[in-house]
Amino acid sequence: MKTAALLLTAAAAMLATSAIAETIAPGANVTVVFDQELPNVPGKSMRAVLVEYEPGGGSPSHRHPSSAFIYARVLEGAIRSKVNDGPEHTYKAGESWTERPGDHHQVSHNASDTEPAKLLAIFVVDTSDRKIVVPDK
């Protein structure tokens, strides 16, 4: 029930917030659609990020801020994902996963070469951490 409320809050923020998408790779756009400091957890914020992949698009191997706990849910299409040394998994619309602080997101890619894919990622992160995606060097 709490997850549903969180997703509804993020969806409402998407409709109410005008944000600029950042292209992190060809065919991959990331838009912060909600950013709010948590009033009962000083120094922490909740950020909702819409990730849109064109057919065949994806993100380069990356990490997120070391303070970030992430809940990701596929909204449309299917996403191939591999975190740390775990197996690569394809998540379909309605499926979700979490990432813990310090995790290495080695694969994040649209599973289709013909259809777009979207996911919503909810971050609980240190307010001072402004960069959401930290590409591998």
Image: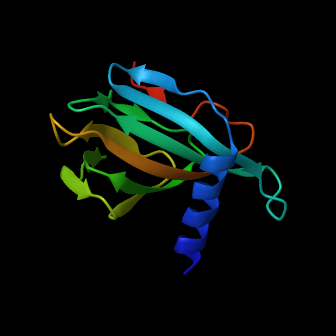
Quarter of the figure with the C terminus: top left
Q: Residue at x 52, y 24 (%)?
A: 22
Asked whether 48 or 128 is in front, the reply is 48
Q: Is residue 51 visible?
A: yes
Say how the picture is coloured: rainbow
Q: Residue at x 18, y 43 (%)?
A: 111
Asked whether 123 or 13 is in front, the reply is 13
Q: Is residue 47 visible?
A: no
- The picture places residue 16, in percent across and down from the top left corner, at 69, 47
Q: Residue at x 49, y 33 (%)?
A: 30
- The picture places residue 37, in percent across and down from the top left corner, at 78, 51
- The picture places residue 132, in percent across and down from the top left corner, at 56, 35
Asked whether 27 or 80 is in front, the reply is 27
Res. 38 image quadrant: bottom right
Quarter of the figure with the N terminus: bottom right
Q: Residue at x 53, y 73 (%)?
A: 4
Where 55 sits versus 5, above or below? above
Q: Horizontal placement of 30 versus 36: left or right? A: left
Q: Horizontal placement of 74 versus 20: left or right? A: left
Where 29 sits versus 42, above or below? above
Outermost residue toward the left in this view: 113
Q: Horizontal placement of 129 versus 80: left or right? A: right
Outermost residue toward the front in this view: 15
Q: Horizontal placement of 72 versus 9: left or right? A: left
Q: How many marks?
A: 0
- The picture places residue 76, in percent across and down from the top left corner, at 33, 51
